[in-house]
């Protein structure tokens, strides 16, 4: 991806020419530069795409060149899998289908047809002929020599043919969608394949196997613990699946997003400030894009500045940025369920005083521990227990066994909530009993805990050894 700017004196013309290579073609897109077009958390980042040092672009490109192969692209939630695929095949050439929104095979292929701008049914006209007979009776006298004359009826049959046109309707399906993908040269991208039921996975999987045999480029996006779903549900597809695994983004990689974007807007941010934005992005380029966009809002920057300007993000500005970004995290209902816990039986739960000035039982204490510094998406039981203790003030601390039991019950609540069609399909909290580790798969949920549920979480580190 390249962006060309034409400089006129100290001013930067705000209409770059964006271009990328797709096969033998170079695709170009002209667009006005603004904060909204530079930092794009929910669409392809034309100006701030970062090619990671580990060469994932090349890995995916090479995998797609293998005819008849289904590519399994695996990585943490919101780690840029869709954006990487769009970069490699071209944003306009990726047919991305969210399996969470297409619960059946029929709905899945209808969505493919819709994106290819085809209807779900086709009508054809067929000419038919209808035969109709009618009888005409004529009266007359007849005579036979030597026989008495008399009256007789002579019937003459005639046949007329009339033309008629009938409309025939045929519902389009998987084979039509596959042919349309071949005709268009588009790459089929399946997001969240594991959201489908087992029956839908098996049916779509068999259809994907047939599509791959016809050399339709296919990429299945998944999180690490679901990367083998297609192989497990479709017999004999294993030999056709080629895996590409993404790691979590490092703070250094995330800082490149800010460096590129703010340079395009003629803004100079301190390296320490950019680093803090990267840390709070929790390994997610999508969240980094959002934080940079909210930074522009707080600084009052909407378009490229006429001259280079240095900005410092003070404590108050950071608070505003993170508060604004937390509006994009929709976890209030889940948080309420986790903080309430299951229905109480027996004695009332012990209440603890927290270092942020609030109080609550073991469920609130445990959530406060997750929100504490430093930012971690995987916590051992030992680390979790220490965090819970330091989040509380006074002599009363939650016993270690209570913390583990609470986490196990919260993990079950999160799993049930994720399956309830509430918009959070994957559990926000997963307790890995065999490793005695807690995993937070969604960076946005952890961000919600830190800046919406516990905005004064820095107080929880007090007294931690």
Image: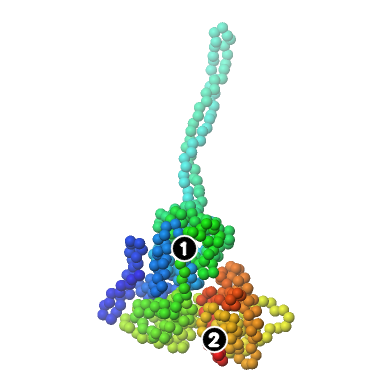
Residue 278 vs residue 302, the one in the foreground:
278
Question: Going from the N terminus, do you reach mark 1 or mark 2 first?
Answer: 1
Quadrant housing residue 19: bottom left
Residue lying at the far top in this picture: please name it.
Answer: 146
Disc number placed over residue 457 in the picture, else none:
2
Residue 243 vs residue 189, the one in the foreground:
243
Kindly report which numbered mark, 1 or 2, lies closer to the viewer in this rendering.
1
Q: Is the residue marked by circle 2 packed among few (<14), some (14-19), or many (20+) residues within 10 Å?
A: many
Quadrant housing residue 118: bottom left
Q: On the picture, is 312 further left or further right than 142? A: left
Quadrant housing residue 139: top right
- Placement of 197 over or under 280, stated as above or below: above
Residue 190 vs residue 264, the one in the foreground:
190
Q: Give the residue pinned by disc 1.
A: 242
Q: Is the residue marked by circle 1 packed among few (<14), some (14-19), or many (20+) residues within 10 Å?
A: some
Q: Residue at x 50, y 27 (%)?
A: 158
Question: Colour mode?
Answer: rainbow
Q: Residue at x 41, y 54 (%)?
A: 183
């Amino acid at each position: 991806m390249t962006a060309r700017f034409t400089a006129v004196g100290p001013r930067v013309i705000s209409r770059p020419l964006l271009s990328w290579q797709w096969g033998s073609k170079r695709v170009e897109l002209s667009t006005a530069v603004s904060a909204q077009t530079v930092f794009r958390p929910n669409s392809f980042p034309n100006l701030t795409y970062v090619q990671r040092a580990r060469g994932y672009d090349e890995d995916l490109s090479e995998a797609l060149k293998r005819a008849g192969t289904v590519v399994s692209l695996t990585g943490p939630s919101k780690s840029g899998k869709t954006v990487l695929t769009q970069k490699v095949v071209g944003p306009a050439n990726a047919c991305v289908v969210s399996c969470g929104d297409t619960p059946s095979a029929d709905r899945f292929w209808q969505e493919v047809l819709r994106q290819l701008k085809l209807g779900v049914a086709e009508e054809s006209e067929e000419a038919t002929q209808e035969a109709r007979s009618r009888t005409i009776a004529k009266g007359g006298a007849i005579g036979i020599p030597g026989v008495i004359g008399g009256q007789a009826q002579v019937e003459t049959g005639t046949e007329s043919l009339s033309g008629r046109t009938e409309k025939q309707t045929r519902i389009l399906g998987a084979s039509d969608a596959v042919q349309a993908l071949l005709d268009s040269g588009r790459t089929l991208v399946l997001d969240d394949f594991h959201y489908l039921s087992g029956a839908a996975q098996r049916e779509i999987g068999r259809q994907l196997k047939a599509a791959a045999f016809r050399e339709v480029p296919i990429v299945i996006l998944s999180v690490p613990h679901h990367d083998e779903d297609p192989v497990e549900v479709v017999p004999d597809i294993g030999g056709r699946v080629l895996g590409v695994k993404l790691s979590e983004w490092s703070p250094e990689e995330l800082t490149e997003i800010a460096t590129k974007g703010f340079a395009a807007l003629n803004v100079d941010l301190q390296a320490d400030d950019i680093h803090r934005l990267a840390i709070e992005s929790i390994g997610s380029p999508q969240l980094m894009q959002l934080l940079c966009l909210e930074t522009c809002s707080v600084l009052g920057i909407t378009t490229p500045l006429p001259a280079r300007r240095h900005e410092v993000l003070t404590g108050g500005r950071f608070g505003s940025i993170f508060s604004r970004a937390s509006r994009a995290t929709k976890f209030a209902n889940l948080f309420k369920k986790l903080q309430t816990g299951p229905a109480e039986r027996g004695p009332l739960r012990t209440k603890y005083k927290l270092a942020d000035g609030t109080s609550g039982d073991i469920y609130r204490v445990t959530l406060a521990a997750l929100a504490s510094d430093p930012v971690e998406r995987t916590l051992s039981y030992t680390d979790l227990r220490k965090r819970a203790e330091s989040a509380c003030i006074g002599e009363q601390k939650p016993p270690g066994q209570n913390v583990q039991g609470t986490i196990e019950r919260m993990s079950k609540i999160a799993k049930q909530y994720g399956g309830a069609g509430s918009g959070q399909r994957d559990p926000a909290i997963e307790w890995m009993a065999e490793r005695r580790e807690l995993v937070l798969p969604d960076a946005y949920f952890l961000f919600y805990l830190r800046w919406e549920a516990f905005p004064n979480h820095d107080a929880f580190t007090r007294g931690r050894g």
